[in-house]
Image: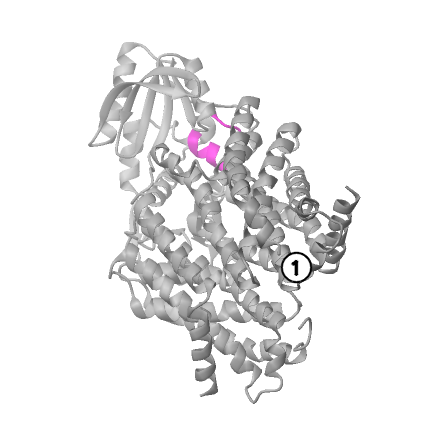
Amino acid sequence: MKKIIAIFMRDIKSNTRDFIAMYILLIPFIFGVIINLLVPSVNETTLNFAFIEGENPSQVEYLENFAKITLVDDYQALEERVNRRDEVVGIFNDDGLYTILVQGNESEQTNKFAKALLMFEQNDVDYKDANANIYDFGKTVNPMKSLFVNLLLLMIGVLGGMLIGINIVEEKVDNTISAVNVTPISRVGFIIGKSIIGLILPIYGSFALVYLTGFSDINVLQLIVLSLVGSFVGIVVGFFEGTKNTDIMEVAASIKALFIPVFGCVAAIEFLSDKWQWLFYWLPWYWVYKGNGALLANEATWSQIGLYSLFIMIPSVLVFIYLKAGIKKGLE
Amino acid sequence: MKLWHSFLKELKLGSKSFYFYMELLMAVIIIVILTMVVPENFESKANEYIFLDLDSNFEEMFIDSIYASSDNVTLEETILEIGKDEFNVDLYETDEKRIYIFDNEVDMKKTAEKKKSLGVTIKLQDNGMFFDYYLQGYESEKFINIVKSVHVLDAVTMQAEYDKIPVKSLGGTQDVLTDRENLLPLFLYFNGSLMGLFIIAAYIFLDKGEGVIRAYAITASKVSTYLLSKVLLLSVTSLVTSFAVTFAVMGFDFNFLGLFILVLTSGFFVSIIGLILSSYYSNIMQSFGVLYILIILLSLPAIAYNIPAWNPAWIQAIPTHYMIIGFKEIIIENGDFMYVALTSLVFLLMSIALMPVATYRFKKTLTVGG
């Protein structure tokens, strides 16, 4: 045990020198800040209108209740604004008739939406007179925010594995593994020592990110379980990359390739219909993302977490068994 | 001439490397995913969950309004599975949405909550229809105001007034890309351009480790020649994979020249940034955190690409925004070639301006970590 800790401490020491300790601490914070800055503005997005300043201030005031407003100096500036690549729709007075100005490439939904809002304004529709009541289910967390946090939880786990892979290959290139082979540390001890970084980053990172982004009321035990099994995937991938690759270029190519299945799982869950989901069942990241999604929505049951953990562990253990012989050779 | 020889040497070595074959394999995987797994168009119909607390006259009136809203309406009595629950519903499917009519309010609310969708109870009040909306709770004030405003005027007046609103178009044409084709710019910028940042750094650290960079100090060849030959090698690999993926998805319907110059110049620009960054570190482990964070930051415009109405000014300050839009212009019908050419020119000029910085950094740090 002492020797394992010695390996880990040696990694920490060299990693501190290499700034790794710093970004282990920093990465979840940077991710958290990005999410906190990004999500409110995405959530507020409905439609963007541009008006000629001073043409009809009361119209602008009315439509501010529904859309984001930009003011421009004159009609020419309005055309220029609408013609830009983002989706901004203009409203202007065309010989006494208020008209929607579009670029022509907007989606049908945007055009319908813009027409409806101007129609409300032209007919003095007051939403306070509506024949409608609004109730809600009390959910305050935007699904977009859950999506970003979930995606970055996955990325932090993957990063742990990448660091292990790079670390092992660098040890190989520097011939320090041969040196370790003649010390009293066993190979198992060496592997465990190397794995600790892949364990600490996802667990610390998950907690930091989740709390920083305001998901503090989730089930902490479930988060620990999912982070642990998720970090096991990272460790196995890290050892796979570390033992199969012989130089930095190879490990870089493997890391680049790793983004395909990781992003593929996210895209499958978010965009693909149910009939295609089975194609991704064998990938552990699919279940990590699914599990974290249920966890962030406060909807995860223990049987669900248990089942997902099993699906995460099975392919990872199989790869680990396959790697076992290779690790011995690969670490030489 | 030296650059040409250096590039040919790199190409010869590179074509035998694991990295080159890995790139080709990735291109094949991307092609398989895009053409066989990703559907031509994603499901885009909205779901509405409704309970009608109305008498038979008003119920009939409401159902008639569904049929009046679309040319193609189908009705199916079906069972909706929500987790372990099963609900009997009448499903009306129009061109734009699926309307599920429930026989009780509890089931409707349960479904709307689980499916994170809109739920409505329509009841009678003051001899007219009144709507109780069930939202999730995170919707913005602006969205709620819109939902409420729909129920101020009666439907006939609303349609008549809506039809009166004039629309003037500046002549643009609607993008006719399928959802699958729409994903292509994201693959092109990520695989072809953005990842060049990381790959060039790995190349440099590999050579640093093997002492190649140090050896350059005592050859007649310039450091800039060495760096450029690396960048060119990456560019050739990116060109091969980008063209392969674009051919597979678009056939011959894209701007060849546009793709050629944008892949080349955007890859060149990203590689130079990667070179400058890598010059500050002595191994890939040191630089990895910075590269990782940078790749995540440079990926943010991909979010704006998927949400056209959300496009804050700071997103437009990120260079990858222009890469994604440029790649889109290359594949859409009547795409704006001038935009692609100008974007490419700016990337080229920025690369040329930054190249001396990279060369200076490498001259200065030839021996760091070598």
The outermost residue toward the top is: B55
From the top left corner, tell me how far across and down residue A280 is, in percent: 42, 38
Magenta region = B134-148
Residue at image location 45% in from the left, 70% down from the top: B14
Q: Nearer the viewer, residue B247 or A33?
A: B247
From the top left corner, tell me how far across and down residue B73 is, in percent: 22, 28
Is residue B143 one of those drawn in magenta? yes
**Which image quarter holds the C terminus of chain B?**
bottom right
**Looking at the image, what colour scheme do you see?**
one colour
From the top left corner, tell me how far across and down residue A81 is, in percent: 42, 58
Viewed as shown, does residue A112 lie left or right of A259?
A: left
**Residue picked out by circle 1:** A171
Q: Nearer the viewer, residue A181 or A141?
A: A181
Could one spot residue A304 in this view of the protein? yes
Amino acid type shown at disc 1: Glu
Q: Secondary structure at mark 1?
A: helix
Is residue B299 one of those drawn in magenta? no
Viewed as shown, does residue B327 lie left or right of B291?
A: left
Specify the quadrant of the image occupied by residue B42: top left
The outermost residue toward the bottom is: B220
- In the rendered image, the vertical position of residue A7 relative to residue B337, given as above or below: above
From the top left corner, tell me how far across and down residue B62 is, in percent: 29, 20
